[in-house]
Amino acid sequence: MLIQPQLKSAFWLVLMMVGFVMPSLSLNIRANEDDITLTNEDRAEIVRDVLTREITRRREEESKYRTLKKGEKTGELQIILSTLNIEPELVPKVTDVKFILMKPDEIETRMKLEGRAQYLAFSEFRVEGSKVIVTLLDNNWSRKARAFVSSKSSRYEYSQANGKWAGKLINSGMLIS
């Protein structure tokens, strides 16, 4: 694998950030004695909620910068979603949204061919007692004039109430290199 030096540095910077900031990088959850056990239905409900929040955020951001003509609808939103740490069957079907599931090496290849890639990745999905902590990264890599990386991290805490999962954003941040 031949990568330009700046791109290689940016790649390792993001990997280090994920490694140091995110204590768990797996959906394969091991339950401690006090931890709840998640079913695939639980995971699917949580994944749907996190992705719905991201879709809403993107649509709101798009509406700030784009004025629709009378009668014009927003187009289908296409989102690349890394399969790292997520099982494809957990990804919901959402009206006017197409999730393009890609393996991490496919994303890297796309970045090399097109010079940029923007994608979402679940970097954390872990049980803490009766709560579930989920972190979604919105990564944007570009190697146009120089290597550029931005990664927005949104961390959520979910708990179950009345048989439904309710989540709240507990922190978010952004890294730009």
Image (cartoon, rainbow, N blue to C red):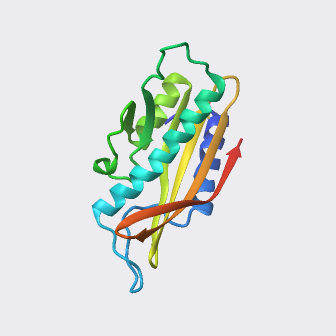
Q: Is residue 40 above or below residue 67?
A: below
Q: x, y (%) of residue 86? A: 37, 53
The residue that appears at 60% across and 51% down in the rendered structure is: 153
In front here: 167 or 11?
Answer: 167
Question: What is the quadrant of residue 29 in the picture?
Answer: bottom left
The residue that appears at 55% across and 13% down in the rendered structure is: 69
Q: Is residue 39 above or below residue 81?
A: below
- Horizontal side of residue 123 vs 163, given as left or right: right
Q: x, y (%) of residue 63? A: 60, 28
Q: Is residue 34 above or below residue 57?
A: below
- Horizontal side of residue 105 vs 57, given as left or right: left
Res 117 visible: yes
In front here: 116 or 173?
Answer: 173
Q: x, y (%) of residue 84? A: 41, 50
Instruction: Please identify the quadrant where the C terminus is shown.
Output: top right
Question: What is the quadrant of residue 143 in the picture?
Answer: top right
- Horizontal side of residue 149 vs 158, given as left or right: right
Res 85 visible: no
The residue that appears at 48% across and 14% down in the rendered structure is: 71
Q: x, y (%) of residue 27? A: 39, 61
In front here: 12 or 150?
Answer: 150
The residue that appears at 41% across and 70% down in the rendered structure is: 160
